[in-house]
Amino acid sequence: MEILLAVASGVLYAAGIYLMLRRRLAQLIIGLGLMSNGTNLVIFMAGGLTRARPPVVPDGATHLVAPYADPVPQALVLTAIVIGFGLLAFALVLAHRVHATLGTDDVDEIGREL
C-alpha cells in the first residue's frame, strides 16, 4: 500500500509542478493545490499505515500496544488540509480580482502591466 501512495504522491507532485510552470493563474493555483495534496500524502505515509489499530491505551495497560496508528501525522495532515483550503480560496479570489482589474490572467502580461 505504501508503494501505491508513494506513486500517487509522485504523480500529484509532477502534475502540480507541470501546472505551476504554465502561464495562466488558474493553472498555477490548481498546481499549488495538487502539490499540497501530494505533500499531505507524504506526511500521512510518514506516520505508517496500520488498519483498525487506534492509538488508544486499552483498559488495564500502561502503554500502547504496537502496531498502532500515529496520531501526530494525522493531526498535521488535517491542519494542512484546512490551511490549504484557506490558501486556495484566497488565491482564487485574488486571481479573480486580478483578472477583473487587468483583463488578463497571463502571468507575463500581468508583470508587464504593473
Image: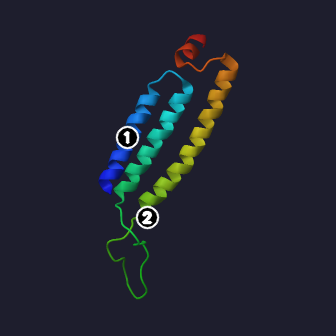
Q: Is residue 43 above or below residue 102?
A: below
Quadrant in which residue 92 is drawn: top right
Tell me the number on the disc at residue 11.
Answer: 1
Q: Residue at x 33, y 51 (%)?
A: 4
**Residue at x 42%, y 82% (from the top left corner):** 58
- Disc marking residue 75: none
Outermost residue on the right side: it is 100
Q: Residue 22 in the image: x percent, y percent?
A: 47, 23
In the image, residue 62 above or below residue 4: below
Q: Quadrant of residue 16?
A: top left
- Kind of element beneath mark 1: helix
* Residue 32 position (above or below residue 111): below
Q: Position of residue 56 (x, y in %)?
A: 44, 76
Q: In this figure, which residue is indicated by the disc labeled 2?
A: 71
The amino acid type, in three-letter code, at marker 1 is Val
Please tell me whether mark 2 sits on a helix, a strand or a loop: helix
Residue drawn where x is 35% and y is 62% of the image: 49
- Looking at this view, name the residue that lies furthest to the top: 112
Query: Mark 2: few, some, or many residues within 10 Å (few <14, many ≥20)?
Result: few
> Residue 18, image x and y in percent?
41, 29
Q: Quadrant of the C terminus?
A: top right
Q: Answer with mark 2 or mark 1, whichever residue precedes in sequence.
A: 1
Residue type at mark 2 is Pro
Residue at image location 52% in from the left, 53% down from the top: 79
Cα–Cα gap, marks 2 and 1:
26 Å
Name the quadrant of the N terminus. Answer: bottom left
- Occupied quadrant, residue 100: top right
